[in-house]
Amino acid sequence: MHEAAHAVIGRRMGWLCGSVTIIPKGNLLGFCESASPWETLEAWQRTGRPRRLRSILLGKMISWMAGAAAEQLFLGSARYAIDDMMNVEEVAAEYFPDLGFDHLYDRLSPMTDYLVRHHESLIRQVACRLTERGTIDSLEANSLIGSKIGAYLPA
């Protein structure tokens, strides 16, 4: 559920996303690949519909928060979101120091919950596919979920 939410919400928020897996690697229980903010910014510029960096970063923060939100909303508890929340804190400190982490989190949390609820069916569909296969590559994920700016195919 956790990685499926990252994959769905990341794409819905306009991030350049890659494959998604629930196969453990190192200390990770799974992960959803995504491009850097700069690669995502460039991809949006190529579409002729450019975005501001702050908007892209807010979308990424929501996508990180979506994993825990999906666990909480659909499974009743969120246990594996420490790395995601550390990422949110780092971006908040670097790019949004004027807002502060607590204020930003309080603003993004209801939006994240809304998006996760709104896309529940698709998140569950992706979670089922991940349970069956373990990994969904970038092109299949984009076909299943949709993408506003294309596939992320890391080198």
Image (cartoon, grey):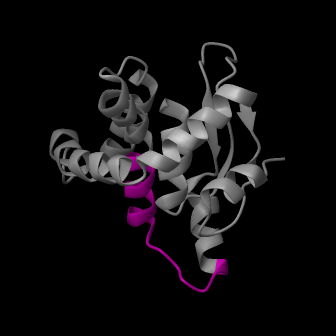
Residue 69, compared with residue 113, is above or below; it is above
Q: Which quarter of the picture shows residue 19?
A: top right
> Who is closer to the viewer here, 18 or 1?
1
Residue 128 part of the magenta segment: no
Left or right: where 43 falls relative to 13: right
Residue 58 part of the magenta segment: yes
Q: Position of residue 154 (x, y in %)?
A: 78, 48
Left or right: where 126 falls relative to 99: right
The answer to whether residue 53 is visible is yes
> Where does the magenta region start and end?
46-62
Q: Position of residue 125 (x, y in %)?
A: 57, 42
Residue 129, compared with residue 80, is above or below; it is below
Q: What residue lies at 30% left-to-right and 22% top-to-bottom?
A: 76
Q: What residue lies at 47% left-to-right and 74% top-to-bottom?
A: 51
Left or right: where 91 falls relative to 14: left
Left or right: where 22 falls relative to 109: right
Residue 68, compared with residue 151, is above or below; it is above
Q: Position of residue 11 (x, y in %)?
A: 55, 57
